[in-house]
Image (cartoon, rainbow, N blue to C red):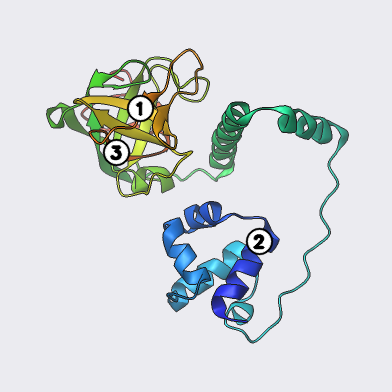
Amino acid sequence: MTFGTRLKQAREQRGFNQKQLAESLDITPTRLNYWEKDKREPDIGRIKQLASALQVSTDFLIGSQPLPKPAAPLSPTPPEAEHLKKYRALDGHGKTIVDLVLDEEYKRIVSALKPEEPEANLIRLDFSEQPCSAGRGTYLGQDVFSEIQVEENALTKRASFAVPVSGDSMEPIYSNGDILLIDKNAEVLPGDVGLFILDNEGYVKKLGKKELLSLNPDYPPIPLEDSVRCCGKVIGLLQKGWIKGKGVSAADV
């Protein structure tokens, strides 16, 4: 087997799709696809990251060991089985909302379980004083950004800037007053939530095939025209407790 074949086999055995594995490595799905098709090869550092994420040895990925048999899956408890039954009965919109809620809650729990550091490092982050719209659209120009100091962590280090939300079109995931962290370098694929500019107005929406979608069914889709510009991917929420130092304070936002 080639490197790409072994990589794909290990990924599928772990139950990852390309997008999920790519996000865990902070790379694009296109780059991962090139590796699996043997169009390119990762360096040794990336091979170690792949081995860790897929729970295989680097020796397997480079071809000197066979892929170990997967452990027997755990049977779901009765409550888990009931949740799975309800999830499978949902339509695509309902499953998207459940997936987003689950992801946000998982991030919150993982963050809460991390040991507290005695003194957090601070980094500077651009902050939009004008909110993006989770509704009908608000102006979001280059002249509305200031600089704040925030706690340095995995999310804030990855973020290019922060922008507050105005409106309820993305509820129940993103509510009025939330502060979004945006990675302007991340690829936004269909199904992802991003920040989009249309006619100088900023919107936080989910990217569809040919339209921008709201999670709140009360709001109609926005046609994806050539004039729509994507400003980045929503990677999480800026917790107000992370805002430190001078400049914009948690009370201001």
Element type where label 3 sits in the image: strand
Residue designated by label 2: 12
Vertical order, 127 against 12 (above or below): above
Where residue 42 sits in the image (x, y, percent)? 44, 74
Residue designated by label 3: 230
Residue designated by label 1: 223
For the question of whether residue 247 can be seen, the reply is yes
Query: How packed is label 1: few (under 14 Cα within 10 Å), some, or many (20 or more)?
Result: few
Q: Alpha-carbon distance for marks 1 and 2?
A: 35 Å
Q: Quadrant of residue 115?
A: top right
Please tell me which of labels 1 and 3 falls first in the chain.
1
Where residue 105 sits in the image (x, y, percent)? 58, 33
Where residue 212 sits in the image (x, y, percent)? 39, 29
Residue at the spot 20% in from the left edge and 25% down from the top edge: 199
Nearer to the camera, 104 or 28: 28
Q: Mark 1 vs mark 3: give the one in front.
A: 1
Please tell me which of labels 1 and 2 falls first in the chain.
2
Q: Which amino acid does label 3 sit on?
A: Cys
Q: What residue type is labelled 2?
A: Glu
